[in-house]
Image (tube, coloured by chain):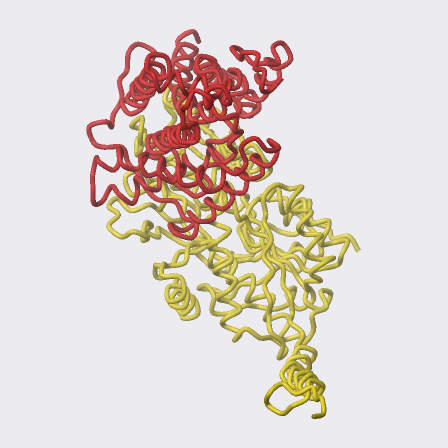
Chain colours: A yellow, B red
Amino acid sequence: MTKTTSNGFGISRRTLLAGATFGAAQIASPFVITARAAESIKIGLLLPKSGTYAVQGEIGQHGAQIAIDDFGGKVLDRPIQLVWLDESTPQATQQNMRKLLEEEKVVAVQGGVSSGDVLAIMPVAERAKTLLMATGPNATEITGKNCSKYTFRVDLPNKVTVNSVYPLLKEHGKKWYFVVASYAWGIDAYNQMKEVVVKDGGNVVGYDQAPLGTTDFSSYLLKVRQAKPDVIYVGLGGTDLTNFLKQMKEIGLTNQMALSAPIVNDTDLWSAGPDAAFGVYPKIWNYTGSHMTKRSTDFVEAFKKKYNQPPEAEGWQDWFGMTSILTAIKETKSTDSAKLVGFLEEHKFDGYKDAPIFFRNFDHQLVQPLLVAQVKDKISDKYDYFDIKSQYPNDSATLDAAYGSQAEIGCTFKT
Amino acid sequence: MTELIISQVVNGLVLGFLYVLIAIGLSIIFGMLGIVNFAHGVYFALGAYFALTLRDSLGPWAIVLAPLGVGVVGIVIEMTLMRPLYGKEPLLGLFMTFGIALFIEELIRTIWGAAGHPFNPPGWLSGFIVWGPVLVTKYRLFVLVVTVMILIALWLFLQGTRYGRIIRAGSRDPEMVSMLGINLKRVFTAVFGLGTAVAGIAGVLAAPLWSVVPSMSEAAIMPAFVVVTIGGLGSFGGAVISGLLVGISVALSIQFWPAASTAVMYALMILILLVRPRGLLGESWERFE
């Protein structure tokens, strides 16, 4: 009897091995070929995954994802890959920005809820000559004295928002109290609003800075109660604003004075609840109201379908930010940031708001109408908290002027 | 000005009791088991989230059942994840609790979502009392009373009962206690459950005051560690004194230098550790010397 290396099926081990290798190659090779032909286009996302602004981070990511879905998940026939790293502190965000650029080789980065974090990553984007779509920060200097050739800002500068709500607030009286987060955004909001108030003959009866992430505002509120202001202007966001409103309710200050903030996220009020939520706020966008366009309505529907809740302002910002990046890639047929910047400086985005909106070529600020929104007296829906009082500016002819002229802005790009 | 200072000191004292309540569970678990429990904050958060889920169906019973639920979670975690690490390198326990903290926070985010949930105090506890310059809300007063009651109950339990004596003895000399025929494993599990349940109570009570979000654990864990460190690790009385001290310092700093109100807590800790490295009432402990 001859010895064979049969395995019982009459196939030698060698044949089996060869077959297996060939089979594996058959399965693997088409994949290898496809992967090479359509290497994904990576776009970085820097939004908070934890801390004060964690909710905004999640909704922002959802918004960006809807934009990618709108493009069918592909641009230039290549799949789009979103790489989301955490935005926490300026230092950590800067590190993650470097990781996105150096290790992940992203073609552009989007994000930034906190102005402090955005100011920290702008120079990194500039050195790497990579497009940074700053979707959520409000500090005026981002498209002002600290502006950068590679940074575009979707959200509203404090300098503009203060003018939008001031006429409504000044009707309540001249005594103003300020409680603001003690970093770039809050401090800038105080400076911008104070200037408007003082110029108009109002006075500041109190000004407190609160560390970001303050949980208990009761001691601040004792001071506010003592000062009896007509208007309280709070440069607080995320859980800070939620805590502030809940604790105002606790000591009976809800609706006892006019309240406003440099900007507002619906989520902060949803989490405070209908009893504690009040105030009049500048708002970049709202999912209900007569300002809604067809495109925005489609976005709301897609968002609701995918995430089972309506999108709030942050969702719109990141949806629009990602849409603008992808549009630029598609139109220029390139991922080269220099070309994307050139495109964004010239393009007018139609159908997203009442008027065509565009990034100005001299400061990269998105020029757009904003909403003045008041919390409803009676809130019956879990999500629908706002009545839209007006749009600012009310005449689209003055839109550009509302954001300040080139001379007023004081932005010069480094060349 | 005197009036404002009085009002801030009282407010700080009341806030201090909330800090004490958050810190006690941490103090018990450290004092009795020698575990530096980084996951303390997530048990606090779980208390709030359990109450949130149960309150619609159970009403006021949710306040009682939520901390018990947290205690059960604590017991399961102790039996499965913590027990194998007793007597090993303390660093392992630290990593483990840190891992548990991250895991449970993500779990909360997955189950209840990243967005916050409204949580109002019951109607009979809304409103506030004004007495001269002092303003205290009824709800915070309620928290204060509950905290004092829990402190007294724990003190009586640990000092006055046989179980309490076993726990205290076991924490100092586990071998000796085991040799006396006592099942220490079970005792440790019970202590861990107790500590996490108290964290759960703190979470339930803080829910109407602070945001109910997955990251609420972060808001609790740092003050708790500061309070326990200042008070002396494992010292009950120390935790009470230091909690109140932290509350008052924070309130007064908000009156005079609000931007530093978070930093003041850490500054106080550094100062006390420089003068008394063991903390205010920390005892010398042969196991950790």
Tell which of A22 and A44 is nearer to you.
A22
Location of residue B151 (image quadrant): top left
Q: Which of B89 and B20 is in front in this view?
A: B89
Residue B46: image location, x then y, percent? 38, 40
- Percent from the top left, x then y, of residue A27? 62, 83
For the point 51% across and 22% down, which residue is it?
Answer: B175
**Which quarter of the rendering shows the C terminus of chain B?**
top right
Q: Position of residue A197 (x, y in %)?
A: 48, 33
Tell me which residue sits at (52%, 59%) in the image: A318
Image coordinates for residue B275, horizontal then vertical, percent = 63, 9
The quadrant of the image that shows the N terminus of chain B is: top left
Q: Is residue A339 above or below residue A384?
A: below
- Above or below, comparing residue B105 to residue A19 in the picture: above
Q: From what the image shows, is residue A287 above or below residue A169? A: below
Furthest-right residue in this view: A415
Q: Seen in the image, is B87 located left or right of residue B45?
A: right
Q: Is residue A263 visible?
A: yes
Q: Would you place residue A190 above or below residue B238 in this image?
A: below
Question: How many discs appear?
Answer: 0
The residue sitting at the front extreme is: A1
| Quarter of the view holding residue B150 | top left
